[in-house]
Amino acid sequence: SFARYRQYFSIFRSCNVGSKQNIWCGACSKCLFVYAILSPFVEASELSGIFGYDLWNQADLMADWRKLLGAEAVKPFECVGTVEEVQYAVYLTVNARLAAGVKRAALPLLLLYAVEAAEQGLLTQLHWDASAECLQSRSPEDPLKVWHKDEQVPMAYKALISDIVEEGRFYAE
């Protein structure tokens, strides 16, 4: 996955809002999605370095976060991944932090909201397991291992994407 190519962290951009200045604005759903999807694979301090600060603690991103998570029915207009991908990234990120000894109450604001939303049954793919004190995934398949057959990807790119999906399996194991 891209997380293995740290030499590009300082130069890659995907933020539409900050594209003219070649920056991450840190205030849009696209920035938050990229932050979330990289979070299981990149150290928190490194992510903060890429984006300028810790997006997990930005209260002004809560409305976008609820939409990305699927806690609200409307998905952001920006080109972002699926609700399932976001929830899976949260599952990996939260459980890694809990396994490292971070208490649930000490999770950053947006991650704590995700745990509470899972506990309340607002998330389709996640639920809070109170006895194990961790998130559990309801996803029938690991999104890092799934090739969506209905994608409209040109044949010339399918082999490359298949390699990336296979690489995702490596990270998930």
Image (cartoon, rainbow, N blue to C red):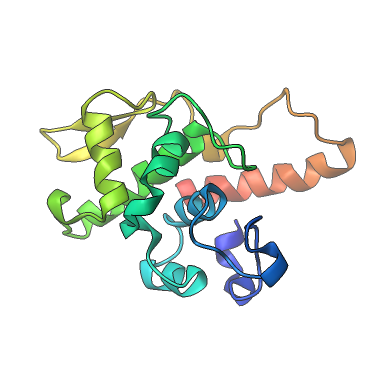
**Seen in the image, is 145 located left or right of residue 8?**
left
Can residue 21 be seen here? The reply is yes
Q: Give residue 14's position: percent from left, percent from top.
A: 65, 58
Above or below, comparing residue 165 to residue 73 in the picture: below
**Seen in the image, is 15 located left or right of residue 129?**
right
Task: Name, please, the residue furthest toward the left.
Answer: 131
Residue at image coords 48%, 52%: 32
170 or 88, nearer to the observer:
88
Q: Give residue 75's position: percent from left, percent from top.
A: 53, 32
Can residue 142 be seen here? The reply is no
Total count of labels: 0
Quarter of the picture containing the N terminus is bottom right
Q: Give residue 151's position: percent from left, percent from top.
A: 74, 28
Residue at image coords 52%, 35%: 143
Residue at image coords 71%, 24%: 149
- The picture quadrant where one finds residue 138 is top left
Q: Give residue 110's position: percent from left, percent from top.
A: 31, 49
Residue at image coords 40%, 50%: 61
**Seen in the image, is 96 located left or right of residue 153?**
left
- The picture quadrant where one finds residue 139 is top left
107 or 40, nearer to the observer:
107
**Seen in the image, is 171 located left or right of residue 128?**
right
75 or 60, nearer to the observer:
60
Above or below, comparing residue 164 to residue 129 in the picture: below
Above or below, comparing residue 50 to residue 57 in the picture: below
